[in-house]
Image (cartoon, rainbow, N blue to C red):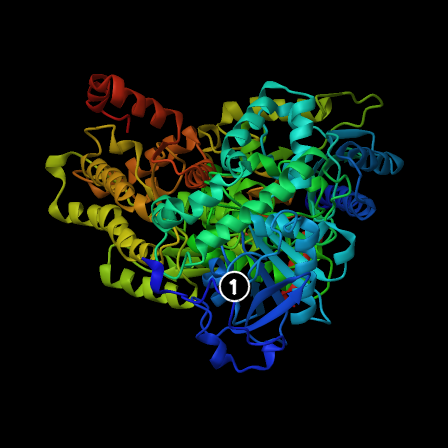
Amino acid sequence: MSTDMGAGAGSGADSSGDNGSGSGSGSGSSTVPGLEGARERRVRTGGVELCVAELGDPGRPTVVLVHGYPDSKEVWSEVAARLAGRFHVVLYDVRGHGRSTAPDPLRGGFTLEKLTDDFLAVADAVSPDRPVHLVGHDWGSVQAWEFATVARTEGRIASFTSMSGPSLDHMGHWIKRRAARPTPRRVGQLLGQGAKSWYVYVLHTPVLPELAWRGPLGRQWPKILRRAERLSGTAYPTASLPRDAAHGAWLYRDNVRARLRRPRTDAHAHVPVQLITPTGDAFLSERLYDDLEQWALGLVRHTLPAKHWVPRTRPDQLASWITDFVTAHESGGPPEEAAESSTGTVRTGPYAQRFGGQLVLVTGAASGIGRATAFAFAEAGARVVAVDLDGEGAARTAELARLTGAPEAWAETVDVGDGEAMEKLAEKVATEYGIVDVLVNNAGIGLSGPFLDTTTEDWKKVLDVNLWGVIHGCRVFGRQMAERGQGGHIVNTASAAAYQPSKALPAYSTSKAAVLMLSECLRAELADKGIGVSAICPGFVNTNITSTARFTGVSAAEEERRRKKTARLYGLRNYPPEKVADAVLRAVVRDQAVVPVTPEARGARFLSRFAPGALRAIARVEPPL
Amino acid sequence: MTDRRTAELRGFREVQRLAYECAETVAARLTPGVTEREAARMQRAWLRARGVRDWFHLPFAWFGDRTAFAGFRIPLQFFPSGRRLETGMPFILDLAPVHRGFTADVGYSGCLGPNPLHNKLLADLRAHRELILREVRERRTLREIYEDVDRLMVRQGYANRHRAYPFGVIAHKIDRVKDRRWSPHVFGFGTQSLKGLASDALRGHRDGWSPLWSPYRFSDHPPAPGLWAVEPHLGFRGTGAKFEEILVVTDSRDPEQSAFWLDDDLPHVRRWTEAAV
């Protein structure tokens, strides 16, 4: 286990002096485990000595990262490393944690007022002239809310990014409002958060938490974290954990009851706030932030499909959102204008919170469902890569995606059935645009006609695009996602024909059934890596798949007639691809496995489960062409 | 004969210019907070002050995502609503005054403040104006032309929103109407004009053509001579743009003379030529 790491972490004995910034970065690097190249200094304030680590050029905007409970500043190591290239990154161990010393006595030493003193002392030491950008996770965010809402820090903070830590004052009001007028929904919300807060009650019992942390719980904690959060890596948690956790219990005891009973009524943020909410947080309900706009004007919201420890599990995404927010508020201009000017539109709504800034790759994006999906993601503020064999159409999609709200959009001309080309594409995308967050394997072609009239050529063609395209996509981009280890989502466009047999579509249905099963298997395989896989089964959607479809066993003229006729029938059905695109985004947000879209697709799905005989009867019907 | 035709076309051209002038004037007077009803009333008042007493249809105004007919299910939703204009919102003014017996039907797309997406839609309408004229001169059937316009829209990445109009028309015939002292209207459409359209429909039904240019079988015929108010309407998510103007179709053998736009000096055309320069 982690006994060999940071042997001196708990001692706090080796002090490199108050002006640590003067010491070379080389000497500091060996003393901070997990934070290579960090310069270390110690800041004395209110009877404690804080251990402060700095990365990056001090001339750049300063970003202060505050850790939570039970953690030390090393929880931020991944995020800090990613921010260090652009910012002056400052991390410090909260009093009583890591290599900072603890107040004596402990009781009353962890009040938010004292924590604010600590923050101001650190800020003054590392950035005496310019306000700092504040980022907090868990208890770091709880404290930072205090920093961002009390008057004496005004002018010292430029922006605040909060994750998994509400203001105790806001929470107090949240509880009061729900308890005062208990509708069923409000009671449900109260009970829900009440159950999630079980550990808070436990931490209020005397002595026992300390004993547990210094004893078996402290020993087991790394294993528990690894299992619950699927953490990998070794530098975290550090060896100081039992002591951190034992001291940190006083964070709760000194503040929670007092603040929840008498929340401040003036806890309005005086800085721009960005809220990042992990949707799978076991300790905090998303509903806690429902009323947050009244406390923080111009609040920017993001959601992340992850559990509580996002600084460990999603460092790339956090670094990108922090970078954007800090950059937007560093220029000094009003926040709204800065956000708007890049796209021309204000992005709001649940999809924007979830997909803003993410990289989405859509195949078959030159028309139909692929194009509509690209636009829907673009509208949510995602960066879009539009892939299609039809380069002109893909370019058009990318162009309109930019106008729709995508900060960036690119077109790539690739045949998805070509494995080598897909490998090349994946390489190019990874080096030039980044790792794909959402992959939509949508490219597909139609093929209709009796099995006995379908040639091997026809089979090869339809399988190459419909099945191999999906396989290649999942293979090359899925691997990148899995290797990054920070989650992601794959959407494969199957079809209602995947479970609705038909004598008219043997080859097409076969390919789509394979896609459906591939998606289900892949979903099982990638679940451990936090990557979701969804199969979309649209049904009859008005796209140009009909006018490019191949009809086997008939003359060219008859084929053309059938194409026109099908196109007309699909036109009469007139189910718009935009609705399918919406289903795609919803499937990603909800991590749905199989999504039938049109009513007929839903009906067939239902029948396939409860009355497969009916589907077999429908399969024999000759389509009216 | 030609003199009479020239005079007649001049009459139509004048009222079309008047209508576009009205649209431009009202568009310039739109400010944040104006409702669709107010915009429609402004058009009506402006034209009434200039002697318009009868209408092919009363002025329409659509703001925001109503320009793309988002969520329209029943025809009543076409009528001006209480939707207020905001900065950056696209709008469409659609008006069809009858002046001295001549009818115009024009559509004007604009935007309050800069909106790059809306600009793109407006620019892309140009290809439709050219396509329609070219194929009418080729005497393709109206249904085919409709489908080609549809295909071009899909290729451009847009949705066909004229499909939402009554009968899904991209165009309809307009004609002279008698100047009456009393000119009532039902559901926003002038009775005189509806009567003209109905008699055209009856006549056309006998001869195998229709005054409505639609995607349906009754439009499966070459363009019939007369004046057609053509209104391709692009929709892209919450943004819509259209133009509407009169296409003159004659029975001349000369392709140039067989079909032409009544007037090339219109706001949207000027916009394209300015952009090209």
**Picture residue at 62% right of the left edge, 75% below the top:** A18
Q: Choose top left, top right, bottom left or bottom right for residue A88.
A: bottom right
Give the residue drawn at x 55%, y 76%: A16
Please tell me which residue lies in front, A537 or A503. A537
- Location of residue A577 with respect to A248 vertically, above or below: above
Q: Amino acid at mark 1?
A: Arg
Q: Position of residue A348 (x, y in %)?
A: 61, 44
Q: Is residue B57 left or right of residue B162?
A: right
For the view shown, which residue lies furthest in the right direction? B49
Crowding at mark 1 (Cα within 10 Å: few <14, some 14-19, many 20+): many
User: Residue B215, position in %: x, y?
Assistant: 48, 33
Indicate the secondary structure of the residue bearing disc 1. Answer: loop
Q: Nearer the viewer, residue A86 or A210?
A: A210
Rendered view: B117 above or below B4? below
Residue position marked by numbered label 1 in the rendering: A99
Does residue A114 appear to the left or right of A588 in the view shown?
Answer: right
How far across and how far down the image is residue A232, in percent? 34, 55
The answer to whether residue B141 is seen in the rendering is: no
Q: A234 left or right of A384? A: left
Q: Nearer the viewer, residue A319 or A510?
A: A319
- Percent position (x, y) of residue A288? 60, 36
